[in-house]
Image (cartoon, grey):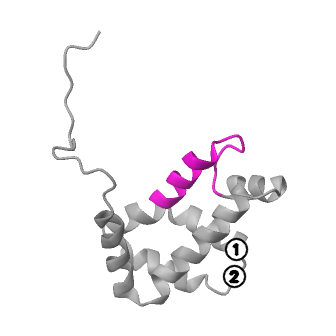
Amino acid sequence: MAIGSWSSSGVVYPIKDFQMFDQQIYDSTIKSGDWCPKAIQDIFSYVDAGITGDDADKREEIMTTMGAWAGMDNGDFEFYFADIFVESVQYGNRTGLCNMLLDVKDLDETQQLQAIYVQA
């Protein structure tokens, strides 16, 4: 039984459907150039299509490349995957993230995912 708890960063004033956080991530990444948020969107679209599509092998390849358990729930995985980008920006590594995406832009998607996994 818990009597109480302590949170180091608890939400004081929760806002339902708070979209300004996502807008701030976009506003931050675009400082590196229009291509940075576009690169994030493109790789996320690739991952989303791969894990929600009918190709079980593609889903497993994406999950394995990103170090996830192949049986992981799709929604949980996408939350984890999005957090890689969000946390890089939120914790001061926007430039490093965008530079890495620029460095791997000519690689295939699997190689891009490998670079993202190493970055994470």
Q: Give the residue at the far top of this rendering.
A: 1
In this view of the protein, which residue sits in the foreground, 7 or 16?
16
Q: Is residue 37 visible to us here?
A: yes
Is 2 located above or below residue 97 in the figure? above
Q: Assign the N terminus to one quadrant of the image.
A: top left
Q: Determine the CA span between mark 2 and mark 1.
A: 7 Å
Label 1, on which residue? Answer: 109
In this view of the protein, which residue sits in the foreground, 109 or 14?
14
Assess disc 1: are there few (<14), some (14-19) or many (≥20) residues with their C-alpha within 10 Å of its C-alpha.
some
At which x and y percent is residue 94? Answer: 37, 75
* Residue visible at 30% across and 50% down in the picture: 16
* Residue visible at 38% across and 87% down in the picture: 32
* Residue visible at 38% across and 61% down in the picture: 87
Is 43 located above or below residue 81 in the figure? below
Per the rendered image, the range of residues in magenta is 66-83
The kind of residue tagged 2 is Leu
Assess disc 2: are there few (<14), some (14-19) or many (≥20) residues with their C-alpha within 10 Å of its C-alpha.
few
Tell me if 56 is positioned left or right of 66 in this view. Answer: right
Tell me if 79 is positioned left or right of 96 in this view. Answer: right
The kind of residue tagged 1 is Glu
Query: Do the residues bearing badges 2 and 1 touch, measured as CB atoms within 8 Å?
Result: yes
Q: Is residue 82 magenta?
A: yes
Disc ID at residue 57: none
Which structural element holds mark 1?
helix
Tell me if 111 is positioned left or right of 30 in this view. Answer: right
In this view of the protein, which residue sits in the foreground, 66 or 72?
72
At which x and y percent is residue 7? Answer: 21, 35
Tell me if 106 is positioned left or right of 1 in this view. Answer: right
Which structural element holds mark 2?
loop
* Residue visible at 31% across and 64% down in the picture: 21
Disc ID at residue 107: 2
Q: Quadrant of residue 58?
A: bottom right
